[in-house]
Image (cartoon, helix red, strand yellow):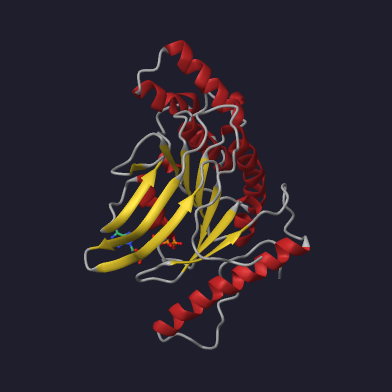
Amino acid sequence: MTPHGTRTAAPTGRSSSTGRGGAPVSLREVDIRFGDFDAVRGATLDIAAGEFVCLLGPSGCGKSTLLNAVAGFVTPAGGEVTCGNAPVTGPDVSRGVVFQSAEALFPWLTVRQNVSFGPRMRRMPKAQRAAVEDRYLAMVGLSHSADKFPSQLSGGMRQRAQLARVLANEPSVVLMDEPFGALDAQTRLVMQVELDRIWRDTGATILFVTHDIGEAILLSDRIVTMTAGPAAAIKNVYPCDLPRPRDLTDPASAALFRQLREDIGEEVARTLRAQGLDDGHDGRSTGDQKGAGR
Ligand SMILES: Nc1ncnc2c1ncn2[C@@H]1O[C@H](COP(=O)(O)OP(=O)(O)OP(=O)(O)O)[C@@H](O)[C@H]1O
């Protein structure tokens, strides 16, 4: 598969059975600075409504920073981020964020109350709220655990609860920052399959940050790599149109895996050289991990 520069993706036309479907997201020449530190420079990317895009890159390059700019947590120093053609000027429930840590759940509330939190804040009537709770608890497979507290859940269940809480706001864009990074390998595989189904059901646009090349191949319509920071940029955009469900051992997936590993390996090696730590390491043992292509 040939990577290409940033482009405007054609809308996928994916329909949703729940939620409000997806919205397009656009980054135009986005620069992000933290004081004197130049974190991201000139990032341009168009994500179509309903598209699933993964951001991959070496540790510390700026993946979360870019996701935070789409979330509205970080204000770009230059350029523009738009969602559904409106400028992003701050956080909004139409852009839900799922974090790596399930600490994002309120520990004093049950799973159902956590899921209900957004609709309650929006003063949704009780009967309607109950229907929303039921729908999203069922969607993530937590109906039977609705009355448990977060401390009574496994790591995978907590991430499901976090996702249900975000989905209960019926966001048109879901931003996921290494949501499965703290899970064991088996749970992670289960969650990847479930997320693929949930994405189809909701029709939401998903921007997903991961270190895991295999995970990106299993889930994405397109995979975006970033250069090592500072002043990180979008490096390549790889279309990933393999038939779903995907199998990392099939030759096309394995070839894409190797291509991505090489792409990220170059950036890791560049970072090590810049730090004077280069000992001939080509970065291939980093990036990832599990899956095929090795
Ligand atoms: N609030 C902040 N203040 C100062 N620097 C920051 C801030 N947030 C991020 N950075 C810096 O910006 C760069 C990009 O960080 P970011 O967390 O986006 O990287 P990442 O690619 O998501 O990393 P990882 O894969 O390790 O999670 C890093 O050098 C980081 O130290």
Query: Does 240 sit above or below residue 274?
Result: above
Percent across and percent down for residue 107 are 41, 34
Percent across and percent down for residue 189 are 66, 49
* Whether residue 291 is visible: yes
Which residue corresponds to the image point at 41% horizontal and 13% vertical from the top-left? 125
Q: Is residue 121 left or right of residue 151?
A: left
Q: Is residue 188 left or right of residue 244?
A: left
Ligand 1 found in image quarter: bottom left
Query: Does 33 sit above or below residue 103?
Result: below
Quarter the N terminus occupies = bottom right
Find residue 249 and report its image quarter: bottom right
Percent across and percent down for residue 104 are 41, 40
Find residue 41 and report its image quarter: bottom left
Which residue corresponds to the image point at 35% horizontal and 22% vertical from the top-left? 122
* Whether residue 292 is visible: no
Percent across and percent down for residue 254 are 72, 65
Quarter the C terminus occupies = bottom right
**234 vs 73, nearest the viewer:** 234
Query: Does 281 sit above or below residue 264?
Result: below
The residue most toward the right is 250
Which residue corresponds to the image point at 44% horizontal and 78% vertical from the top-left? 271
**250 vs 148, nearest the viewer:** 250
Which residue corresponds to the image point at 31% horizontal and 57% vertical from the top-left? 79
